[in-house]
Image (tube, rainbow, N blue to C red):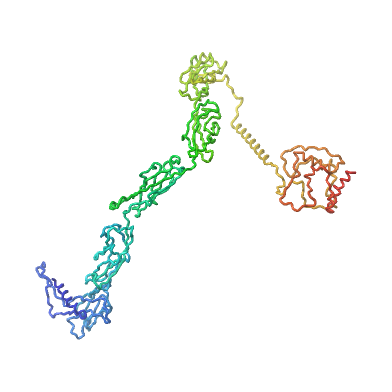
């Protein structure tokens, strides 16, 4: 044991029993004594090192925290061996808390704490002490450092960093499975006593969970805890200091523990048998219903896969797993037929897709149910015996010949009669027709393979009782070839022969084409219609022939053109032939046989036109065309439009003036003599309120005798215009929505005057007042004149 350890133990033994009056004595010897601090340590020069003993015997003070007394707490006493007790020395304290937290009696050296000290705020304080001469203020001892260490008491309870913890553990875990660790801290001094020694215990959550006293690890305490029975647990953990002994302080925290899911539950169908219905007309892929197996697990542990494992409808129906809803959607796989089968049975299995091998012992993670599907009858459209029809017919058949028959029936149990028809959109030329009762397809017009080799028709079959139920089928008609076309020249041949040609010289190779298409291929024969002294035809037997000369030399001045009839025949039955004529010109050729000139004389134009002249002629023609177009456009715009564009133009022969006139006394307003002298009337003039469409010659009417009555004159003119189709409509009938009250004058129009047989009575004009007296005299006196 070293000297420092010995001194420390000695001071603890001295000071601990006497906290109220600790005192440290500092003595200084008159003769400095030297003591060896340790073993001898040889130096390089052979001398032994020695350490001189200090005059201060220095140590640390101990102070208990949380002092509750009313006086200052005594810490200790500083004393120098130079202090004679006569007050000549003065003690000075500096360092942590000196003068505020710690004060010293400068005469006696007593140190006190002025307030309660908390070790958790600061565990020790380092200060410096010095003794000086009061008069000279010179230090009598060198400044030395000492420590005041705060002794701890159990004044802090354990605390958890979190008030509420959240943890989880898989369900069905074995006993002792670690859940979470909680740790509490105690601010007391862990090196002094048991104030900071914490022990954990469980206050709430038994018997499901336990906690390790020393570590705070929470573990499961019961086996096979099932999440489906209970998912949430609340555990209260207590941390107590003083090693858990009575009188220790404690703190608590809450731990919310959730059991997470594992796949420990198989899927289960709620029903052993499920009934579904579907219409027989449902198309392939139609969803007819769903099945669902329940699984107490969650998430991927509850994912289920559905499949059809047995039944008589495995080829008619299919099942699809819906991932979002975990349902099995049953769909139609093939077309259904109520008349063929009305009930199907399926065995559907549901199986977990994620199985935990640890829980195989809980049983198979699958379940089955029976699904019965009933087919419901609907009114189905007719069904053809084939999906499509192909008929072949020769093009030379007579009109009305049956080319084939389509058959369809009503698949329903009622078996309604079927009516056939052609979709005319597929037979716009109406070449074919169909018998509505038995479906026989026949021709209604001659066929021609060369015009159309295929006819794609659509036949419609509809129920007679329910025409809306109909079905369409494609009918393909292939027109077979008949040899009804004669071969012809393949192209137009521009043939010439040189004047210096020799006998047997080739002047042209010809070929032929035929619109027909025989099975054995085309085969043509070429020959002359008659023996020709100038040319001959040689058949190459490859559907071509050569035209050869038969004489030596030709003269274009004598004969400039030869016509050579060539007969072309085919090899099919019946044989068809045609005669084609070759036009052969006689031309002058060079020694190589190249044509130079074919005409007897060169025809030259008397004078040629220059390019500028041609352009001028063309411009003149264009200008003339523009003038004609403009004239036609202006003439078209000259429509018969009234000059009076008012919507109130009623076309009556009435002219409205702003001047009312002078009344019955005004004899100059109108000269009645004009009416009595028809000879003075000018020739008929056209109307000025419309533009006449055509100009016609006014018809001259015989004048009435000079003594003709005005009434006869008006009637004659009225009749003349009524019977004249070219006369404009001076009189017209206007209809108004509101006519007003009846007038005692009735109508003054002359529309019906031409149809009146007898004379009219104008005596009522006298009853209208003085303004109509003049009219009454004019028309009223006519009767007396006639009688006279």
Q: Nearer the viewer, residue 585 or 381?
A: 381
Give the residue displayed 44% in from the left and 46% down from the top.
277
In the rendered image, residue 526, in percent from the top left (x then y), is placed at 50, 18
Q: In which quarter of the image is residue 99?
A: bottom left
| Left or right: 643 in relation to 553 | right
Residue at the extreme right of the image, as rendered:
788
Relative to 169, residue 511 above or below: above
Q: Nearer the viewer, residue 298 or 521?
A: 298
Relative to 526, residue 143 above or below: below
Q: Is residue 119 visible?
A: yes
Residue at the extreme front of the image, as rendered:
414
| Left or right: 610 in relation to 377 | right
In the rendered image, residue 285, in percent from the top left (x then y), is placed at 43, 44
Q: Is residue 582 visible?
A: no
Count of numbered circles in the view: 0
Q: In which quarter of the image is the N terminus?
A: bottom left
Q: In which quarter of the image is the C terminus?
A: top right
């Amino acid at each position: 044991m070293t000297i420092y350890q010995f001194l420390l133990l000695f001071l603890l033994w001295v000071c601990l029993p006497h906290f109220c009056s600790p005192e440290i004595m500092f003595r200084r010897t008159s003769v400095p004594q030297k003591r060896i601090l340790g073993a001898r340590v040889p130096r390089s020069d052979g001398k032994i090192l020695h350490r001189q003993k200090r005059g201060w015997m220095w140590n640390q003070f101990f102070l208990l925290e949380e002092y509750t007394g009313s006086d200052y707490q005594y810490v200790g006493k500083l004393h120098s061996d130079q202090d004679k007790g006569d007050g000549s020395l003065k003690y000075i304290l500096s360092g942590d808390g000196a003068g505020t937290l710690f004060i010293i009696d400068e005469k006696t050296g007593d140190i006190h704490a002025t307030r309660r000290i908390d070790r958790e705020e600061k565990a020790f304080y380092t200060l410096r002490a010095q003794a000086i001469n009061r008069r000279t203020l010179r230090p009598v001892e060198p400044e030395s450092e000492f420590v005041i260490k705060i002794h701890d008491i159990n004044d802090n309870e354990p605390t958890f960093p979190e008030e509420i913890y959240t943890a989880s553990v898989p369900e069905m875990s074995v006993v002792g499975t670690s859940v979470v660790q909680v740790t509490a801290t105690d601010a007391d001094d862990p090196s002094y006593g048991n104030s900071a020694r914490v022990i954990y215990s469980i206050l709430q959550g038994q018997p499901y969970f336990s906690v390790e006293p020393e570590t705070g690890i929470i573990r499961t305490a019961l086996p096979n805890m099932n999440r489906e029975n209970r998912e949430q647990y609340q555990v209260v953990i207590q941390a107590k200091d003083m090693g858990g002994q009575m009188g220790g302080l404690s703190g608590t925290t809450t731990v919310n523990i959730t059991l997470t899911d594992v796949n420990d539950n198989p899927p289960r169908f709620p029903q052993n048998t499920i009934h579904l219905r579907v219409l027989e007309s449902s198309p392939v892929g139609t969803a007819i219903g769903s099945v669902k197996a329940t699984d107490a697990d969650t998430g991927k542990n509850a994912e289920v896969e559905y499949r059809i494992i047995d039944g008589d409808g495995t080829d008619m129906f299919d099942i699809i797993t819906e991932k979002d809803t975990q349902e099995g959607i049953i769909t139609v796989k093939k077309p259904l037929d109520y008349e063929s089968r009305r009930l199907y049975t399926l065995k559907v299995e549901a199986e977990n897709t994620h199985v935990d091998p640890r829980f195989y012992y809980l049983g198979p993670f699958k379940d089955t149910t029976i699904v019965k599907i009933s087919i419901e009858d609907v009114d189905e459209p007719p069904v053809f015996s084939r999906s499509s029809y192909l008929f072949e017919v020769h093009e030379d058949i007579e009109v009305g010949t049956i080319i084939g028959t389509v058959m369809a029936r009503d698949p329903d149990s009622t078996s309604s009669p079927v009516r056939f028809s052609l979709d005319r959109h597929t037979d716009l030329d109406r070449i074919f027709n169909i018998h509505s009762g038995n479906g026989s397809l026949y021709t209604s017009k001659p066929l021609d393979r060369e015009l159309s080799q295929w006819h794609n028709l659509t036949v419609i079959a509809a129920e007679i009782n329910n025409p809306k139920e109909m079905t369409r089928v494609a009918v393909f008609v292939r027109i077979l070839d008949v040899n009804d076309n004669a071969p012809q020249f393949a192209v137009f041949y521009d043939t010439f022969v040189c004047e210096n040609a020799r006998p047997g010289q080739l002047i042209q190779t010809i070929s032929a084409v035929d619109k027909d298409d025989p099975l054995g291929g085309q085969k043509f024969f070429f020959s002359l219609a008659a023996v020709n002294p100038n040319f001959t035809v040689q058949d190459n037997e490859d559907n071509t022939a050569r035209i050869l000369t038969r004489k030596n030399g030709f003269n274009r001045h004598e004969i400039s053109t030869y016509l050579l009839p060539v007969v072309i025949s085919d090899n099919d039955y019946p044989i068809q032939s045609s005669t084609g004529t070759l036009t052969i010109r006689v031309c002058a050729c060079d020694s190589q046989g190249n044509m130079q000139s074919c005409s007897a004389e060169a025809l030259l134009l008397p004078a040629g036109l220059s390019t500028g002249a041609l352009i001028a002629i063309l411009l003149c023609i264009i200008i003339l065309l523009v003038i004609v177009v403009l004239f036609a456009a202006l003439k078209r715009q000259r429509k018969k439009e009234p000059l009076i564009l008012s919507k109130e133009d009623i076309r009556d022969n009435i002219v409205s003036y702003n001047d009312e006139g002078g009344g019955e006394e005004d004899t100059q307003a109108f000269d009645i003599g004009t009416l009595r002298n028809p000879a003075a009337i000018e020739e008929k003039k056209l109307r000025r309120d419309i533009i006449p469409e055509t100009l016609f010659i006014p018809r001259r009417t015989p004048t009435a005798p000079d003594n003709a009555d005005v009434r006869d004159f008006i009637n004659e003119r009225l009749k003349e215009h009524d019977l004249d189709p070219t006369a404009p409509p001076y009189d017209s009938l206007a209809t108004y929505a509101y006519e007003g009250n009846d007038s005692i004058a009735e109508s003054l129009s002359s529309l019906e005057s031409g149809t009146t047989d007898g004379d009219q009575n104008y005596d009522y004009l006298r009853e209208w007042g003085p303004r109509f007296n003049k009219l009454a005299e004019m028309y009223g006196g006519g009767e007396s004149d006639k009688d006279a």
